[in-house]
Amino acid sequence: MKDAVEVAVEAALAAGKIQRERSQNIGRISSKGSHDLVTEVDILCEQEVIRIIKKRFPGHQFLAEESGASQGASSPSKWIIDPLDGTINYAHGFPCYCVSIGLEHEGEIIVGVVYNPNLDELFVAEKGKGATLNSKSISVSTIPKLKDSLLVTGFTPEVIHSLDDNMGAFRNFMKASQALRRPGSAAIDLCYTAMGRFEGFWELKLNSWDVAAGFLIMQEAGGQVTKLDGNPLSVYDREILASNGLVHDEMVDILGKE
Ligand code: IPD
Ligand code: CA
Ligand code: CA
């Protein structure tokens, strides 16, 4: 597994370098739908991440946001990649975005790497070996009550067009917590919860590439990650509730009200 972690880190740093170098020159921006963009940098980063990983693991499967699922490979190992999480931030020059790389093996996420090039923050987790930020061990916060918690959420393009638009939960959590943020990168939201900057994160209609790496980073940092109702979560579920564990039940209760 050491090899896989090293390759994931190499690929994440390479994509982060592209994001940094191209931040003033993001090239053509296309729209995947209203509220949903893709830039040349998303594509370049994805190609670079897949190229680096394929060189070492040519038989593995890939599931990447912009190119989809690889065809043909039958390996039990699958790399789940968001080449640029926070594209709308990137397109506006708002410095909150990252690259997120998870490795699933026989249905379990065993490696997670998230790199934020703006702060040069590299989050790494390996199944059973803990989670780190720039090589230092991280763990979730110890704040026990929701009223003293800083929470975070997001709104996918899909949710904006849905009746279930997260606004009810947003309102309820705003009143029940100390404060609520919406920075715009689900992978960073998960990592910040894992290292104790936030106490809890929830979001609806996410995709596996948004959460694969952050899911493991959260778990290895001692956090709790479930569906909104507190039941066990797979990264293919389209909702997530992640917390320091201590405020989890309070969050499940509030989410149940909507
Ligand atoms: C988005 C970000 C955002 C979240 C959206 C995602 P993208 O990913 O993670 O925080 O609210 O749900 O789609 O499109 O920038 O990779
Ligand atoms: Ca994303
Ligand atoms: Ca993306």
Image (cartoon, rainbow, N blue to C red):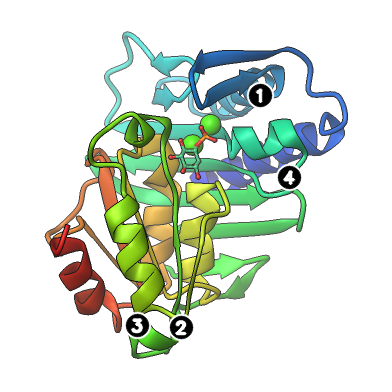
Q: Which residue is mark 3?
A: 146
Which one is earlier in the sequence, the residue at label 3 or at label 1? 1
Q: CA distance from mark 4 to mark 1?
A: 23 Å
Name the mark on residue 94. Answer: 4
Q: Which residue is mark 1?
A: 48
Residue type, mark 2 in image: Ser
Q: CA distance from mark 2 to mark 1?
A: 35 Å
Q: Position of residue 63 (x, y in %)?
A: 39, 25
* 243 or 1, nearer to the observer: 243
**Label 4 crowd (10 A; few <14 / some 14-19 / many >=20):** some
Q: Nearer the viewer, mark 3 or mark 1?
A: 3
Q: Position of residue 223 (x, y in %)?
A: 35, 72
Q: Position of residue 77 (x, y in %)?
A: 33, 33
Asked which secondary structure carries label 2, the reply is loop
* 155 or 60, nearer to the observer: 155
Residue type, mark 1 in image: Glu
* 208 or 173, nearer to the observer: 173
Asked which secondary structure carries label 4, the reply is loop
